[in-house]
Image: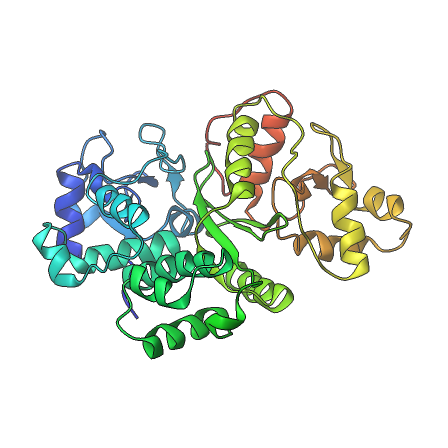
């Protein structure tokens, strides 16, 4: 398994130089102050013996560190690091391109660093990301009626057998059977409280989760099982609409999402998730009130379980459900995010909460 952290010497050099290109690659936790920072933090640089490194802010928070108030490591800057942005732009502009390790070195980019970045950001290696984009575009071309000859030639495959094997491994069926096929497009979305992974079928949004949620892999497996469709990097009109609406929501100017949603589940789960959509913006319901609302007066525990299985966070507002005594209760994205979202909806438009572990 590829380590998600660069070599220690490289990380020491990066944070001592305030190298912004390492922001998001690792985080620096200072033992003497109990603070976790970005590598580019302008604060005074601690001695190497006084720091430890984490692959994610979440890991540092669980280790007891607080986010720095100068560099705000929990906030997302909304853009790719300069060293990798041209690479992603090139792939998106021409998904059929094949970029090998030698090509990366020729661009002055370390292949190991690229692999590490793509695993952290997209949950797959750089080469796997390129294959998924290449096949995703080929899939769309087939659905739009392109001939197999055209697809194979245009998307960089050298043989029918190689294309068929890769296509069937990704989508579970041969290319010729895919004229009416569908897939779930997935995209990384930035937010003030951490990155999100979104998924959309042709019908609507079916996934929106924080990328550090422990159940994320289970959610992927559940989606593939329910929809019987492959998950590939890409976008469609629903993801574009979701991104626009989320931006307005986080700015405090949108109270009601209109993007289409698809949330299959058991009849009880769907009843709970539909009821969540009825909780007004800026309000909270207790688990008991939610259970009563759907006619399950003694089903608070079952309601809480279904609430926790919601696959479309924020838009289906499971964060608006609290304990009967008013305490926040549980939240798959972390209680600090739940507190942040509720504060936003109550007009406080919060910055990063000082101590998200509380």
- Residue 256: quadrant of the picture: top right
Direction from residue 147 to residue 52 in the image, left or right: left
Q: Nearer the viewer, residue 171 or 290?
A: 171
User: In front: 342, or 159?
Assistant: 159
Asked which quadrant contains residue 89, the reply is top left
Q: Residue at x 48, y 75 (%)?
A: 174
Residue in front for this viewpoint, 137 or 229: 137
Left or right of 181? Residue 278 is right
176 in relation to 250, above or below: below
Is residue 31 in sight in this rendering?
A: no
Residue 250 drawn above or below residue 120: above
Q: Residue at x 89, y 54 (%)?
A: 298
Relative image position of residue 42 (x, y in whole percent): 22, 29
Q: Residue at x 9, y 50 (%)?
A: 108
Q: What's the colour scheme?
A: rainbow
Q: Is residue 222 visible?
A: yes
Q: For the N terminus, which image quadrant?
A: bottom left
Residue 294: percent from left, percent from top = 87, 48
**Residue 18: x and y, percent?**
17, 36
Specify the quadrant of the image occupied by residue 33. Answer: top left
Residue 351 rendering spot, x and y as whole percentages: 47, 26
- The answer to whether residue 68 is left or right of residue 183 is left
């Amino acid at each position: 398994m590829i380590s998600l952290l660069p070599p220690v010497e490289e990380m020491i050099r990066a944070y001592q130089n305030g190298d912004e290109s390492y922001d998001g690659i690792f985080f620096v936790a200072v033992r003497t102050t109990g603070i976790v920072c970005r590598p580019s933090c302008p604060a005074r640089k601690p001695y190497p013996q006084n720091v430890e490194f984490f692959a994610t802010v979440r890991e540092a928070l669980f280790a007891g560190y607080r986010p720095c108030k100068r560099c705000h490591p929990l906030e997302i800057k909304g853009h790719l690091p300069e060293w990798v942005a041209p690479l992603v732009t090139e792939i998106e502009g021409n998904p059929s391109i094949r970029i090998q390790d030698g090509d990366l070195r020729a661009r002055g980019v370390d292949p190991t660093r690229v692999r590490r970045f793509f695993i952290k950001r997209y949950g797959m290696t750089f080469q796997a990301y390129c294959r998924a984009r290449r096949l995703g575009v080929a899939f769309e071309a087939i659905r739009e009626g392109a001939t197999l000859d055209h697809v194979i030639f245009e998307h960089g495959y050298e043989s029918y057998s190689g294309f068929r094997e890769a296509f069937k491994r990704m989508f579970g069926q041969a290319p010729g059977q895919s004229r009416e096929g569908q897939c779930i497009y997935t995209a990384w979305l930035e937010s003030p409280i951490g990155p999100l992974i979104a998924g959309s079928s042709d019908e609507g949004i079916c996934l929106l989760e924080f990328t550090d949620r422990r159940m994320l892999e289970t959610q992927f497996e559940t989606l593939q099982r329910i929809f019987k469709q492959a998950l590939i990097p890409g976008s469609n009109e629903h993801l574009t609409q979701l991104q626009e609406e989320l931006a307005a929501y986080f700015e405090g100017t949108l109270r009601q999402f209109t993007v289409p949603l698809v949330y299959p589940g058991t009849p009880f789960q769907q009843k709970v998730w539909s009821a969540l959509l009825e909780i007004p913006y800026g309000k909270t319901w207790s688990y008991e009130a939610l259970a009563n609302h759907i006619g399950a007066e003694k089903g608070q525990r079952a309601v809480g379980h279904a609430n926790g299985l919601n696959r479309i966070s924020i838009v289906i507002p499971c964060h608006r459900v609290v304990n009967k005594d008013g305490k926040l209760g549980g939240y798959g994205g972390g209680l600090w995010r739940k507190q942040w979202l509720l504060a936003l909806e109550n007009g406080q438009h919060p910055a990063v909460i000082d101590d998200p572990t509380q």
